[in-house]
Structure formats: C-alpha cells, structure tokens
Amino acid sequence: MRSRVASSVIRAFRAASSRSASSLAGDGRAVMSAAACRHSAVAPAVTAGKAWTNSSYGTVLSTAAFLSASVYTFVDQELSAAELERTFIAIKPDGVQRGLISDIIARFEKKGYKLVAIKLVHPTKDFAEKHYDDLKGRPFFNGLTDFLSSGPVVAMVWEGQGVIKYGRKFIGATAPLASEPGTIRGDFAISVGRNIIHGSDGPETAKDEIALWFKPEEILTYKKETDKWLYE
C-alpha cells in the first residue's frame, strides 16, 4: 500500500511539467493527500528499478509539499488579480484650474490603487452630453454639460480591489458641504456646481464611462512591485 502511495507521488511530479496551473493545483492536492498517509516507519519501495528508503521518500514528500504550496500561492495570486476592478475618475475643469490634480492623484496612489490610464482632454458639448446621458431631461442638465465642456478635464482609470466603491468614499457627497472632512469634496469644494471631481457609481457605469473616454489601447495592464505588499 505504501509503495503505491510513493508511486502516485512520482507520477504527479512527472506530469507536472506539461500541465497548466489549474492542473498543477490538482496534482498538489493529490500529493498532499499522499503525504498525509505517511507513517513514521516506511518500508522500502521499488519504483522504476530504484529502491526508495525512508529518507528518500521523506525528501520526495517534503518537495511535494513545497510544490503544492507554490501552486496554491500561484493560484491565489491569480484569484486576487481576478478580484481587481477599474473605475473612471475625472477631475473637472474647476479642479484643473485650481491646481488640485497632484493632490487628487496622490490620494489614490497612497491608498494603493493603480493608475492604468490618464489624459488631459477638453470635452466638447456633445461629448459632455454623452457623459451625462443618464441625466438628460433634468433641469440642471444643460448647465452641467456646459460646465464639463468649459475647460480641460483630467480623465483617469484607476484599478484595485474595491476601487469603485472606495473611490466614491474618497470623493465625498455630491454636495461639498455635506461631505466629510478628509474627502476630496469635503476638503476642497464648497458649491455643488463646482464639486471638482467625478467618479463612477457602480460597475456598469464604470464600464460605460471608461469605454466612452478611452480607447482599449489607451488603458495599460501592468504589474507593480508594491502589489505584493497590498494584496494577500
């Protein structure tokens, strides 16, 4: 019985080089199950014409445990990456004119979010109407689109876990005087009509706004060395 356990370990290692990460994870589970069956005294097993002693068998199982841990770490990193989301953030003309670009970017960076797209653009009236299409028909729609198209806007895409919801917390309430101190609007704005910044309010909105403001090739996918210090 014990020799069959050893054989299963060897087969797992032989198959490892030709398998995908998901298959490796399965092998890791099988190997660790085999390791769990190990007793303190193991009779020599013979595989492929070579004798396996207690010490060599233990070495294989120790290596198996390392492989399994490595595989799980790899899979966990992929799962963490899959949980990342993107949001659209725009510094409006008043924020640009008041020189608040660096202050706003710094808040997102210090939190740990990753900037994957940025550009300075002067929206047209038509473009502003597309951006605020969901507010069409509201009495303030014309003034809102006039303002957004009145000067340069810093358009950005930020990436990270929970960036959509937490980005809204960073921004603060629509009415600056109702925003908590520490938020962007709470610290830098007074009037609703000059509230400095826009942020997507949900996953679907983020997807639509990013597609409106950016071409796919303008959005980068890259790794930062600091990511390992931010995500488990």
Image (cartoon, rainbow, N blue to C red):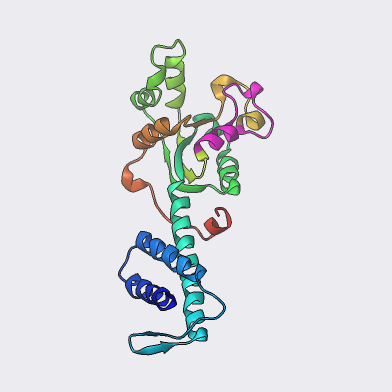
Q: Residue furthest front?
A: 1
Residue at the image position 40 percent from the left and 52 percent from the top: 221
Q: Residue furthest bottom?
A: 50
- Looking at the image, residue 127 sits to the left or right of residue 68; the answer is left
Q: Nearer the viewer, residue 17 or 156?
A: 17
- Which quarter of the rendering shows the N terminus? bottom left
Q: Nearer the viewer, residue 3 or 97?
A: 3
Residue 46 magenta-drawn?
Answer: no
196 is higher (above) or lower (below) than 22: above
Residue at the image position 42 percent from the left and 21 percent from the top: 145
Residue at the image position 53 percent from the left and 34 percent from the top: 165
Q: How many marks?
A: 0
Q: Nearer the viewer, residue 167 or 144?
A: 167
- Which quarter of the rendering shows the C terminus? bottom right
Residue 175 magenta-drawn?
Answer: yes
The image quarter containing residue 6 is bottom left
- Looking at the image, residue 9 sits to the left or right of residue 97; the answer is left
Does the rendering let one see residue 156? no
77 is higher (above) or lower (below) than 181: below
Residue 102 in the image: state x and y as whole percent.
57, 44
The image quarter containing residue 134 is top left
Does the rendering let one see residue 16? yes
Q: Residue furthest right?
A: 181
Residue 117 in the image: state x and y as whole percent.
42, 45
- Looking at the image, residue 175 sits to the left or right of residue 158; the answer is right
Residue 92 in the image: state x and y as whole percent.
50, 31
156 is higher (above) or lower (below) than 177: below
Q: Residue furthest left?
A: 18
125 is higher (above) or lower (below) than 54: above
Residue 41 in the image: state x and y as whole percent.
55, 81
Residue at the image position 66 percent from the left and 22 percent from the top: 177
**Residue segment shown in magenta:** 164-184
